[in-house]
Amino acid sequence: MLLLLIVLILLSTPNHLLAYYKTLIDTSQDGLVQITP
């Protein structure tokens, strides 16, 4: 049930997730652990 929910979220908001992970990578490269979704 949880896996299905995760899959639905991944399929429904790919752009948001890509932007979130890009922000995560950028902040980690800068040495900042500040993540704002």
Image (cartoon, grey):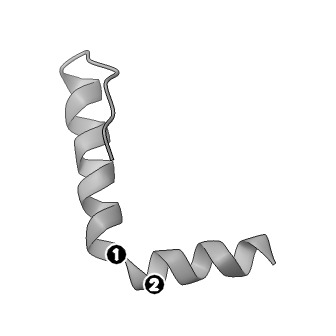
**Image height check: is 31 above or below 15?**
above
Amino acid on which disc 2 is placed: Leu
Amino acid on which disc 1 is placed: Pro
Residue 5 percent coordinates (x, y): 66, 77
Badge 2: few (under 14), some or many (20 or more) residues near its Cα, within 10 Å?
few
Determine whether, in the image, residue 26 is placed left or right of residue 34. Answer: left
> Foreground: 16 or 30?
16
- The label on residue 6 is none
Quadrant for the N terminus in the image: bottom right
Determine whether, in the image, residue 6 is placed left or right of residue 34. Answer: right
Badge 1: few (under 14), some or many (20 or more) residues near its Cα, within 10 Å?
few
> Foreground: 5 or 25?
5
Q: Which residue appears at 34% of the width and 75% of the height? A: 14
Q: Secondary structure at mark 1?
A: helix
**Image height check: is 37 above or below 8?**
above
Determine whether, in the image, residue 30 is placed left or right of residue 10. Answer: left
Residue 15 percent coordinates (x, y): 26, 72
The part of the image, by quadrant, that contains residue 33 is top left
Q: Secondary structure at mark 2?
A: helix
Q: Which residue appears at 70% of the width and 81% of the height? A: 4
Residue 7 percent coordinates (x, y): 59, 79
Residue 27 percent coordinates (x, y): 23, 29
| Residue that numbered label 1 is attached to | 14
The part of the image, by quadrant, that contains residue 36 is top left
Determine whether, in the image, residue 12 is placed left or right of residue 24. Answer: right
Q: Which residue appears at 22% of the width and 25% of the height? A: 29
Disc 2 to disc 1: CB gap under 8 Å: yes
| Residue that numbered label 2 is attached to | 11
Q: CA distance from mark 2 to mark 1?
A: 6 Å
**Image height check: is 8 above or below 15?**
below
